[in-house]
Amino acid sequence: SSSAVNTSLRPSQQCCQFSLHAMFARSSMIPALRAAARPTFGASPAVLAARGFATQVTFVKKIYADGSTCQKCDFVWKQIVKDKLVEKIDRIVVADERDMKSEGIILATRHKVTRAPFFVVNEEGASEDQEKIYDVYFKLKKEVFAQETGENEKNEEIIRGMLKQVF
């Protein structure tokens, strides 16, 4: 029978084996599958990413007027590496306080962002005014990369942000 389970597989694998005939036997599924495959303009980046649509993510980090790097930017980058999400970052841009024409400064000005680091997310083909800005990494991680962040990570990022404002 075409719907028989292959018993040569380990028990944990058997539950994941399906017959194509059984999956598509109901013709009522076909319209829903077609609708799910259709592009949805205006959908959130997470929805588009889940469907395989291209989303570009730019990480904007800061360099201070004295040439030093932003500690919070370094912390967030280390977290991206730890989370194995480096390949999801398409570009790294610098907001250099020594060069008010640097791409990062231009992006920060355009989007009225006052703290670093931040992320610019845009769907392929979208205009600049449709770019979405994330200035909190764990929110980007959840909404764009569809990954949860632990409470300790959230708290550490919040504390670093507060310390940055104090010092």
Image (tube, rainbow, N blue to C red):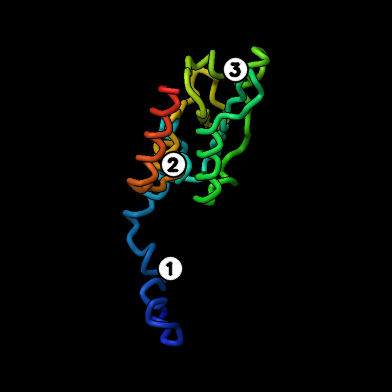
* Residue sitting nearer the eye, 146 or 136: 136
Which residue is identified by label 2?
A: 141
Q: Earlier in the sequence, mark 3 or mark 2?
A: 3
Hey, what amino acid is under mark 1? Leu
Provide the secondary structure element on which disc 1 rests. helix
Q: Looking at the picture, does residue 100 appear above or below residue 51?
A: above
Residue 144 visible at all: yes
Residue at the spot 36% in from the left edge and 69% down from the top edge: 22
Q: In the rendered structure, which amino acid carries the disc numbered 3?
A: Ile
Nearer to us: label 3 or label 1: 3
Instruction: From the top left corner, tell me how far across and down residue 4 is, in percent.
Output: 38, 81
Number of the front mark, 2 or 1 = 2
Indicate which disc, 2 or 1, sits on the residue closer to the N terminus. 1
- Position of the C terminus by quadrant: top left
Q: Which residue is mark 3?
A: 105
Image spot of residue 16 (x, y percent): 39, 71
In this rendering, position of residue 149 left or right of residue 108: left
Mark 3 residue element: helix
Q: Is residue 9 above or below residue 115?
A: below
The residue under the point 40% across, 50% down is 33
Q: Around disc 3, counting alpha carbons within 10 Å, would you say few (fewer than 14), some (14 to 19), or many (20 or more)? A: many
Q: Is residue 98 left or right of residue 14?
A: right
Amino acid type at mark 2: Lys
User: Where is mark 1, residue-wise?
Assistant: 20
How dense is the environment of label 2, judged by Cα within 10 Å: few (below 14), some, or many (20 and up)?
some
Depth check, mark 3 against mark 2: the one in front is 3
| Residue 31 visible here | no
Q: CA distance from mark 3 to mark 1?
A: 53 Å
- Residue in view at x 35 percent, y 46 percent: 152
